[in-house]
Image (spheres, rainbow, N blue to C red):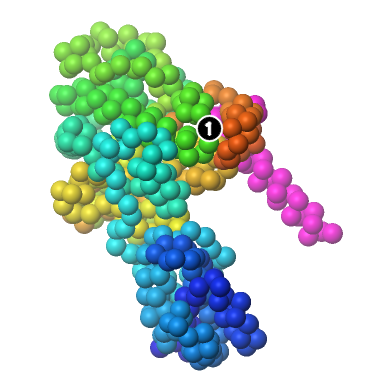
Amino acid sequence: MPSAETESSALVVALSALSAALAPLEAKGLRIVGLHTTRGAAAPCVALAVRGVGAVAACRLVGASLGGGCVRAPSTVDEALELLLDAFGAHELLADTDLDELAGCMRLQRAPAQTGLVLDLEALLAAEPGSEPSRLFCRALRVEGYVHVRCPPPTVAVLRRLEQLCSEWYSLPTDDKEADISEYGHVDRKFTGYRQGRYREQLEVRLEAKGGVLPAPARVAGLAHAFEAALSLLEAHGRRLLAHVAHDIGVDVGWLLALLDPDGSGAPNPPDELGEAATDDARNDPSLRHSLVRACRYVAGVRGVGGSSVLCDEHTDVGFLTLDAHACRPGLEVRRRADRLWVPVEEEGEASCERMAVMVGDTLERVTARFYAATPHRVHAPHVGERIGLPFLLRGRSDALIDVRAPRSAAAAAGRSVHLAQMESTTIKELPAMDAAQSILHSWFRSSKAAQ
């Protein structure tokens, strides 16, 4: 039971009763943190976390005065937490006044079980932008920051084969791996190659414009072709999913897709066409696509960040979308946008291995002015054995110019809203620098205001 100084309770109130509910609580000097949702209610509802001396008694008095069962006032912090999670379905939160305050007040410290919408990828790829599957996908991606999709068998087969062959390659002696793959670094102004970090091994592979992949591992038969097949397939999937996003933000699909590499990379070459001569020619005159697969190996028993089990610390990905195939050994977590809780994405079992998580990248966040927010995620060590992660990052061309004047004008003429940042002459590669400049400017304004 909480002490009198940290006593907390909760209310779920119809909006029409909100003013009447707040008045007696505020009169007692109680701290109130509010959330609202429209899920599962004829009218929007509000949950209020109330903290301070006499919080439980005050909530009970309010409940008695309102009547009709619209208010419930539990007597312990745990019961209040359960009430809030039940009221919001654990992942359907739409807005908040101060979630950090609520987390401290209600002691939201436990990680919930995997939740979230699971959509059929094949149906979603076939759906028209703006259709019901398209709207479900976009809304979940905006509200939660990620979406589970159930992959069709051909996609599952491509991804599982790549996972298996990567595992074989990572089991090679370190000298063999370093001899097979060039050291991690810039090629054609893009990072690629192999590196062994403190907590994981990483192999970053991209498609070449002329066919094939770079780097092209040769020590495990079929691995280069498996990368090519996966990259080609995932890029096609990512472009189609981005078309749904384009419709959701109110722009022509072509405008958004024009920020990517040109389409038409072609189907992957069969294994017997990936000859040594072709690979040498490509290395001499590389022209790599911007999107990539980052094959990462995490091993059980390794102590990670700060001595924890986290082997890849919290981060967001550069790009528009990340398509991250569920590994057969769980470890991936995302920080859900709705409530900022860490949510395990993967589970044990075949059902999870047939899914993929779609997450928002930094570029999409900046282009849409946070209408879509980049998804923070991290990776824990597997309980046993190894975990092979295969995130695909759908990236725009670094020199692609973002000019929102045309889509804004088209939206205004059509009488529809558009969710775009104000940009007229910014390239994708300049976006991080622009963020840094804005941060410096904001800091200067804050310092000037404090000095005054």
Residue 416 lies in quadrant: top right
Residue 297 seen by the camera:
no
Residue 235 seen by the camera:
yes
Instruction: Inspect the image, locate mark 1, and give the three-letter code of the amino acid beneath it.
Output: Val
Is residue 3 magenta-colored?
no
Residue at left offset 52%, top offset 60% = 95
Residue 16 lies in quadrant: bottom right
- Compared with residue 359, is residue 241 higher up or lower down, i.e. above or below? above
Q: Position of residue 439 (x, y in %)?
A: 65, 46
Which image quadrant: the N terminus?
bottom left
Q: Nearer the viewer, residue 360 or 73?
A: 73
Residue at left offset 84%, top offset 59% = 452
Secondary-structure class at tag 1: loop
Tell me where the magenta segment starts and ends, as one range: 424-452
Q: Position of residue 54 (x, y in %)?
A: 54, 91
Is residue 428 magenta-colored?
yes
- Compared with residue 62, is residue 128 higher up or lower down, i.e. above or below? above
363 sits to left or right of 169: right
Q: Nearer the viewer, residue 237 or 59?
A: 59
Residue at left offset 51%, top offset 28% = 252
| Within-10-Å neighbours for mark 1: few <14, some 14–19, many 20+ | many
Most common secondary structure along the magenta stretch: helix
Residue 310 lies in quadrant: bottom left
Which residue is under mark 1? 251
**Which residue lies most toward the right here?**
452
Q: Nearer the viewer, residue 435 or 307?
A: 435
Q: Position of residue 49 (x, y in %)?
A: 50, 76
Residue at left offset 60%, top offset 81% = 20
